[in-house]
Image: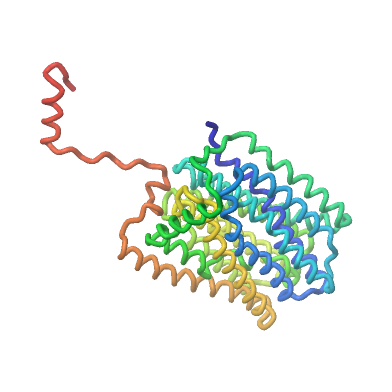
């Protein structure tokens, strides 16, 4: 059976990033240029994240029906149609409610596509390659987000929305090509929805009985959620006198490359330290970059420098989060269990964006950045306490072991002298070593 190569997930998930890049990069910038307040913009982006919080409701359908390849093709078609609709709609103060509805509806295709990718990763990728594949998955989503966001700004600025949307939607279809390069593991037994939910409940109960599972849930709902402020970087760019070209570059293709590099950096770090340390450490560094942006000079070079370094650590943080979650959930009901955790995380990002929008209205862009940093650092402090308590209750957890991260095998247990004498006696006089 042909196993998917880790880099396949980079290509497969690019449409997810491209489509969401319009929501989190192009839309905030264009809307701000047309006089729409940052608080209103953050509400649209927060609504998009909130829809991802409900995706667990249809995740069992992916686990219980069709193949992951089939779901990927269906999702890609929905995603392309949704992206076209978003780019074709005019952006103005009067159209924001309708645009918000289209943005939210379009996220269904994105959720299905990501489920297909993560389900394949969880079931078809060998354990020793999961961290690498998870890093490729994060890198592809980040690069797609950056390139898609920058490209959308350029296309919408130069072409009618319908033409720009058609160009992007047509290009996304090419990302399905890696599906031809691997085989899906056969299902041992295909169950209906009722049976799938029963098994899911059993698997989730097993997850809740472990300290690593509880820590994973708490990580998902914590305020560490790095990257929330980055969804508003294009909206606040004018305060640093950043040009359209600079916004396209630093929030577009270059941000995608930087975030993808950050995901690779996270993969490298996870071969040396615990996945949770990677997640929290990178999250803390995003807070430092946000504070630096707020306190630094209001100049284009400062905007470019601090937002790019912020995005580097966003990539590392998400790679650490994804790898820890994949290692915790096991191989059964992968799409559903992962999406319960991811849904909790998306709700956290959504409410954090809501808080940032209010902070922007009351305290300006500096207040937005300080609030983002405070929530992140507070979440890290809380999780360090949780991890310390979990370590006392269960000192060793396989889900976060360094040996599994590096793909190492445990050394064989030492044999006693008596065991060696018995083996020599059983081998007879004709064998020597």
The location of residue 379, given as percent across then percent down, is 49, 71
Report the front residue among 254 and 160: 160
Image side of residue 341 versus residue 155, left or right: left
Specify the farthest residue to the top: 430
Would you identify the image quadrant in which residue 159 lies? bottom right
> Would you place residue 334 above or below residue 423 in this image?
below
The location of residue 294, given as percent across then percent down, is 63, 73
Would residue 394 be seen by someone viewing this image from the given angle?
Answer: yes
> Would you place residue 125 above or below residue 150 in this image?
above
The location of residue 400, given as percent across then percent down, is 40, 54
Report the front residue among 146 and 174: 174
Specify the farthest residue to the bottom: 362
Would residue 250 be seen by someone viewing this image from the given angle?
Answer: no
Q: Residue at x 63, y 68 (%)?
A: 229
Image side of residue 173 versus residue 311, left or right: right
Q: Residue at x 64, y 34 (%)?
A: 180
């Amino acid at each position: 059976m042909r196993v998917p190569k880790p880099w396949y997930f980079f290509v497969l998930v690019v449409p997810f990033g491209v489509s969401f890049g319009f929501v989190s990069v192009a839309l905030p910038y264009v809307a701000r240029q047309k006089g729409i307040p940052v608080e209103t913009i953050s509400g649209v982006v927060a609504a998009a994240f909130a829809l991802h919080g409900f995706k667990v409701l249809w995740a069992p359908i992916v686990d219980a029906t069709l193949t992951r390849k089939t779901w990927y093709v269906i999702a890609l078609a929905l995603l392309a149609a949704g992206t076209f609709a978003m780019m074709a709609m005019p952006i103005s103060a009067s159209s924001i409610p309708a645009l918000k509805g289209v943005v939210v509806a379009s996220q269904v295709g994105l959720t299905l596509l990501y489920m297909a990718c993560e389900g394949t990763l969880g079931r078809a990728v060998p354990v020793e390659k999961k961290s690498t594949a998870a890093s490729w998955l994060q890198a592809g989503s980040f690069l797609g987000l950056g390139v898609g966001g920058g490209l959308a700004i350029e296309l919408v600025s130069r072409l009618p929305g319908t033409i720009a949307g058609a160009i992007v939607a047509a290009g996304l279809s090419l990302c399905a090509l890696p599906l031809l390069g691997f085989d899906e593991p056969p299902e041992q037994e295909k169950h209906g929805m009722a049976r799938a939910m029963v098994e899911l409940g059993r698997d989730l109960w097993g997850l809740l009985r472990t300290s690593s599972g509880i820590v994973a849930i708490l990580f998902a709902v914590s305020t560490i959620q790095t990257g929330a402020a980055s969804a508003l970087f294009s909206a606040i760019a004018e305060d640093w006198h950043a040009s359209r070209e600079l916004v396209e570059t630093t929030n577009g293709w270059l941000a995608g490359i930087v975030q993808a590099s950050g995901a690779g950096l996270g993969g490298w770090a996870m071969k040396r330290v615990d996945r949770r340390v990677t997640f929290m450490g990178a999250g803390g560094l995003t807070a430092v970059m946000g504070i630096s942006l707020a306190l630094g000079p209001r100049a284009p070079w400062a905007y470019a420098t601090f937002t790019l370094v912020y995005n580097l650590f966003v990539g590392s943080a998400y790679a650490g989060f994804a790898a820890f979650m994949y290692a915790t959930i096991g191989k059964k009901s992968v799409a559903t269990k992962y999406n319960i955790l991811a849904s909790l995380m998306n709700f956290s990002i959504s409410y954090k964006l809501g808080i940032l929008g209010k902070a922007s209205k009351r305290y300006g862009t500096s207040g937005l950045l300080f609030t983002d940093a405070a929530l992140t650092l507070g979440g890290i402090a809380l999780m360090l306490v949780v991890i310390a308590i979990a370590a006392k209750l269960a000192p060793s957890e396989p889900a976060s072991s360094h040996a599994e991260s590096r793909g190492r095998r445990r050394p064989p247990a030492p044999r006693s002298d008596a065991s060696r004498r018995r083996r020599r006696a059983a081998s007879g006089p004709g064998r020597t070593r």
